[in-house]
Image: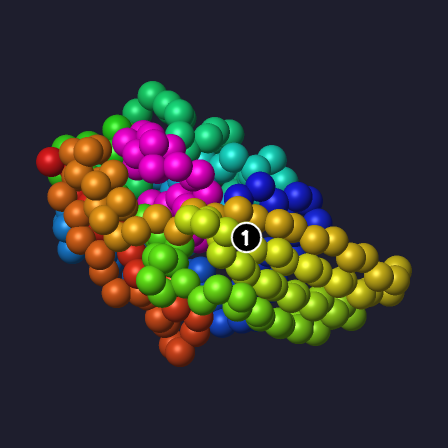
């Protein structure tokens, strides 16, 4: 997802206020990794965004790195984690010259691939950065059979002299989702309004599974993370182990 600087600056604030706990999610994801690879000590977070999960992984793994396509999000991550490497790269064709015990891709980012060929490429590149027996955890977007066409959402954040409103509308366009996200930010300087339009693919469970299998990974779909009654992670998490 290609977020601009305005969105990147408020991303964490908005999602935390909606109940998302990046630290507890990082701990839960780490537990899923260690269940499948008890000796795992290194992790790569693909589409790491602002580095919120990556900060948690850095506390739980001996070695952690990130990869982020959007310059604005990458800048926030690098500012948050000056001692960690956050690579610039596209998940479809990245190559960073080493492998890891675990690779993660959260935030539905993999569904930004527009075709199954691109999905195969992205999962394939992630798997290629795994050691044998390494763990790949990927958070999908909604599947065609559980996506709510025409869904609208709204949220209001008030904190430290600033008010942020976030309105969303999602519609189905063939096998893709068009999600429009409108923001109004009010502070002592006045108002700022901006809109992001995201196109996200409605891949099926079978298409995700096929991509993992073609990448040489055994795969299962795990239940969504839902921590302390907070916002769950969509329809679940795909967990693959490289053969």
With 9 as the anchor, is 33 left or right in this view?
left
Q: For this rendering, which residue is in front, 196 or 147?
A: 147
Judge whether 168 appears above or below 41 on screen: below
Q: Is residue 179 visible?
A: yes
Q: Residue furthest left?
A: 243
Q: For this rendering, which residue is in front, 204 or 89?
A: 204
Residue sitting at x 60%, y 35%: 71
Tell me where residue 77 appears, x and y as whole percent.
55, 43
With 72 as the anchor, is 118 left or right in this view?
left
Which type of secondary structure does the marked residue at label 1 adopt?
strand
Main secondary structure of the magenta stretch: helix
Residue sitting at x 62%, y 56%: 180
Stretch of the chain drawn in magenta? 104-126
Judge whether 227 appears above or below 142 on screen: below
Q: For this rendering, which residue is in front, 194 or 26?
A: 194
Q: Is residue 79 visible?
A: no
Q: Is 115 in the magenta?
A: yes
Q: Residues within 10 Å of mark 1 (few under 14, many from 20)?
A: some
Q: Tell me the quadrant of the picture where the C terminus can be found.
A: top left
With 53 as the anchor, is 44 left or right in this view?
left
Q: Residue furthest front?
A: 174
Tell me where residue 3 appears, x and y as whole percent.
61, 45
Tell me where residue 213 appears, x and y as whole percent.
17, 38
Residue sitting at x 53%, y 47%: 199
Residue sitting at x 28%, y 31%: 124
Tell me where residue 131 appears, x and y as whole percent.
19, 32
Instruction: Name the image colouring.
Output: rainbow
Circle 1 residue: 178
Judge whether 65 appears above or below 96 on screen: below
């Amino acid at each position: 997802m290609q977020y601009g600087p305005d969105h990147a600056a408020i991303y964490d604030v908005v999602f935390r206020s909606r109940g998302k706990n990046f630290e507890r999610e990082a701990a839960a994801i780490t537990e899923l990794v260690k269940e499948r690879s008890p000796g795992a000590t290194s992790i790569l977070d693909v589409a790491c965004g602002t580095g919120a999960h990556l900060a948690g992984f850095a506390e739980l793994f001996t070695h952690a790195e990130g990869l982020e396509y959007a310059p604005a999000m990458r800048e926030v991550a690098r500012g948050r984690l000056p001692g960690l490497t956050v690579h610039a790269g596209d998940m479809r064709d990245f190559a960073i010259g080493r492998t890891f015990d675990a690779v993660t891709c959260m935030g539905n980012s993999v569904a930004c691939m527009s075709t199954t060929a691109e999905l195969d490429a992205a999962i394939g590149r992630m798997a290629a950065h795994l050691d044998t027996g390494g763990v790949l955890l990927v958070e999908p977007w909604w599947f065609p059979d559980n996506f709510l066409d025409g869904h609208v959402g709204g949220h209001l954040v008030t904190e430290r002299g600033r008010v942020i409103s976030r309105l969303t509308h999602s519609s189905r366009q063939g096998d893709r989702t068009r999600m429009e996200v409108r923001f109004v930010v009010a502070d002592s300087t006045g108002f700022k309004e901006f809109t992001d339009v995201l196109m996200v693919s409605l891949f099926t469970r079978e298409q995700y599974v096929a991509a993992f299998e073609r990448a040489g990974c055994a795969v299962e779909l795990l239940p969504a993370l839902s921590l302390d009654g907070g916002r769950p992670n969509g329809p679940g998490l795909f967990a693959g182990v490289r053969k």
